[in-house]
Image (spheres, rainbow, N blue to C red):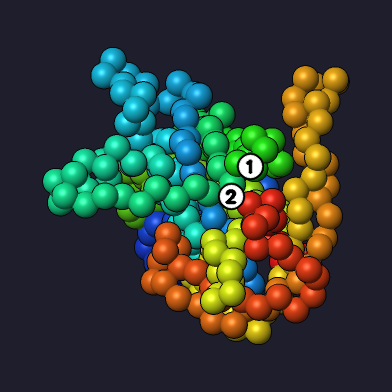
Amino acid sequence: MKKIKSILLTLVTFLLFGCGSVATTTVSGIDGTLNENVEAENYQGLKRTVAIARFSNETEYAKGAFYDKENDPVGRQAVDILSAKLAATGKFILFEREDLEQINLEAGLSQKEIQKIGADYLIVGSITEFGRKTTGEVGLFTKTKKQTVEAGVNIRLVDVSTGQIVYSEEGKGEAETETSTTLGFGGQAGYDATLSDKAISAAIEKLVENIEKTCLDRPWKSYFLSFDSEAIVIAGGVQQGLKNGQELYVYTYGKKVKNPQTGMLIELPGEKVGKIKVLSSGGTTVSDEYSFVSVIEGNLEANKISSYFIQDK
């Protein structure tokens, strides 16, 4: 009898101490688990200027009777996540396009004129897949509930100078959370709204790496602002990563010809005609910064500065 009581006591103790909830959250991107603690890199190179045009929601998610295409919450969510991830790399100068109307309105109220700056690259994106499901299992003593969100994001990177799409890819991400109870004990999992953020973030994660690589593999460009006996000045400065002593190359524009295959004008490669060195920089923002340079190679003509452009390679 004592032996039976001992076994029952052990069983009850095991069940009571085993009762409770276990909650786990898993986030998966294209190639593995998403690292949510993204730290800004100490990037020392030249920064590219990028504008995010818009993110459309091509799915039926969150499109009720009062759906407003211009204020789609899922699309805005994607813009915010992508902006934060690009900013965290320290490799880009980002421009606001999604809320440009509101910025113009606020500037008008403050009687300020906005400096409109063109970007090197424009990002256009869309949410192509979005779904949420809840599943569960009921055992003899346990009950589990799993919430899963899957997202698909398509991004196109456009070179503004040519209008050409230089990178396009679709990323997929998934986020899920699971809770379990034993003998009715333990917490109950309610609706987890954060899973939407995590799934979209996971889908965008790998795309950001490819945007970085595409932009940084292409040359950084600048132009002459002034060229005379007093000073030679180019656009760009510290904000874009230029440093004193840095050497840059000067090219002439290539000939423009019509491509019979596409019917579009294309510019042939230009000719490298000189090299310049950065002496000092001025200005406080991307819109007004400049750099004084000296010509160290080539015979550049002051009256032809509009026919030159500058690259870092």
Give the image location of residue 10, x and y in percent.
45, 69
Crowd class of label 1 (few under 14; some 14 to 19; many from 20; radius 10 Å): few
Checking the image for residue 120, the label placed there is 2
Please state which of residues 119 and 198 is positioned toward the viewer in this rendering: 119
Disc number placed over residue 308 in the picture, else none: none
**What residue appears at the point 72 percent right and 58 percent down from the top-left corner?**
219
Q: Could you tell me the amino acid type at mark 2?
A: Asp
Q: Are marks 2 and 1 in contact (CB under 8 Å)?
A: yes
Q: Is residue 222 left or right of residue 38?
A: right
Looking at the rendering, in which quadrant would you find the C terminus?
bottom right
Q: Is mark 1 on a helix, strand or loop?
A: loop
Tell me: 235 left or right of 114: right
Describe residue 105's horizontal placement relative to residue 86 as left or right.
left
Which residue in the structure is indicated by mark 1?
161
Report x, y in % for residue 221.
65, 58
In the rendered image, the vertical position of residue 143 relative to residue 281, given as above or below = above
Report the amino acid beneath label 1.
Answer: Ser
Expressed as whole percent of the image width and height from the top left, the position of residue 62 reads 37, 26
Q: Which of marks 2 and 1 is nearer the N terminus?
A: 2
Query: Could you say where residue 96 lies in the image, as x and y percent from the top left?
Result: 40, 48
Residue 8 or residue 133, whichever sits in front: 133
